[in-house]
Image (spheres, grey):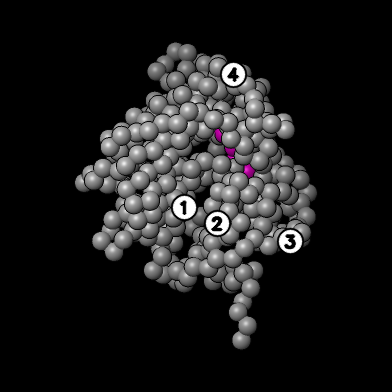
Amino acid sequence: MPKPSIFERIKLQMDCQKPFVLYSDFNQNAIKALFQTKAKSYQTSKFNESGFVFAPFDLKNQPTYIIPEPVSESLEFNLKSKSPSFLSSQNSKSNAEVHKNLIKKAIQSIKITALEKVVLARTAEIEYLNINLLDLFYSVAKAYPEAYTYFWFHPKTGTWMGASPESLLKIEGNKLQSAALAGTQRFKDSTEVKWDVKNFEEQTIVTNYLKRTLNPHLEFVNTSKPKTIRAGKLLHLQTLLSGNLKATPSGFKALINDVHPTPAVCGTPKKAAMAFINKYEPIDRSYYSGFLGEIKLHSNLKLQHVNLVVNLRCMQLDRNTAKLYAGGGITEKSIPDSEWEETEAKIQTLKSVF
């Protein structure tokens, strides 16, 4: 009997309501897949088992799901070059005035409260007529080979897809690396660009936060100089932070809870930014600006390998609608029209594959 194709396998998983994930690491052509063999929902809050996790923006109010390694089958295959077989009506809905007014409110709050920066998110919707989800994922992975691309299905979260430019935590043995990513401008043929004060300040806020947060968990925090990186048609400022993990009793769970959400997706001070988002942001972020990726532990429950990315440039797919998410960091120097344009450019990342 011939082996089922990846397309048939995905269809069977969805029909049987069994979770799965397809994913491709930064600058990799190989696609990995993890197919859960049981139609059961597994959650984690301790992050102390091997598998692929899918975590929300707000860890306190929404569950983190895991496809555990012991109850899953893993596969690896290369990206197929295929012309997409879907049609979209490109009927996108979004409200510029609502978002710009929210930005103005945030700038006002930053001027009169302890809030320094807040990240505000919005959505846009695309209606499509006929879609093969695997073809759509191939299109995303092919369009953004430098990003971490994924296709996640779970009966409790629905279907998500994305092309994230941002690593959250990478751990091999006791060596850790994280990235501070902030600042955005459109790519125009070169990465040799100038950055304004607002973007540099935003980048410094994220870097300093990660340095402070990682400090109790690392023997010493090494910080690179900020450099311009390309993510599709956008440019960002990136600073890498690295060091050796201390053997702390609170362990990996405490590290995750300290680091996430970073000022790149929430703001600073974290508590004040989170309060502003919960009070005024009109959308439910759900798993947008959460994190996802692999956690592997040794048999003695010591960390072996971690590769987590921030869930950015992502969309949630329904029967005939794609909800695309984007956000931008607001500081006292923000200009509402420019901030709106930035979210439009980010939304274009996935809109362009339809």
Residue bounds of the magenta highlight: 323-327
Label 3 to label 1: alpha-carbon separation: 26 Å
Residue 276 visible at all: no
Label 2 to label 1: alpha-carbon separation: 9 Å
User: Residue farthest to the bottom?
Assistant: 1
Say whether disc 1 or disc 4 marks the residue closer to the N-terminus.
4
Q: Is 285 located above or below residue 53 in the figure? A: above
Q: Secondary structure at mark 4?
A: loop
Q: Secondary structure at mark 1?
A: strand
Instruction: Name the residue: 64% across, 25% down.
Output: 193
Instruction: Name the residue: 44% across, 24% down.
Output: 205
Q: Position of residue 24 (x, y in %)?
A: 56, 55
Could you say which quadrant of the image residue 274 lies in? top left
The residue under label 2 is: 23
**Label placed on residue 293:** 1
Q: Is residue 93 magenta?
A: no
Q: Are marks 2 and 1 in contact (CB under 8 Å)?
A: yes
Say whether disc 4 or disc 2 marks the residue closer to the N-terminus.
2
Question: Three-letter amino acid code at disc 1?
Answer: Gly
Say whether disc 2 or disc 1 marks the residue closer to the N-terminus.
2
The residue under label 3 is: 82
Q: Is residue 160 left or right of residue 319?
A: left
The residue under label 4 is: 196
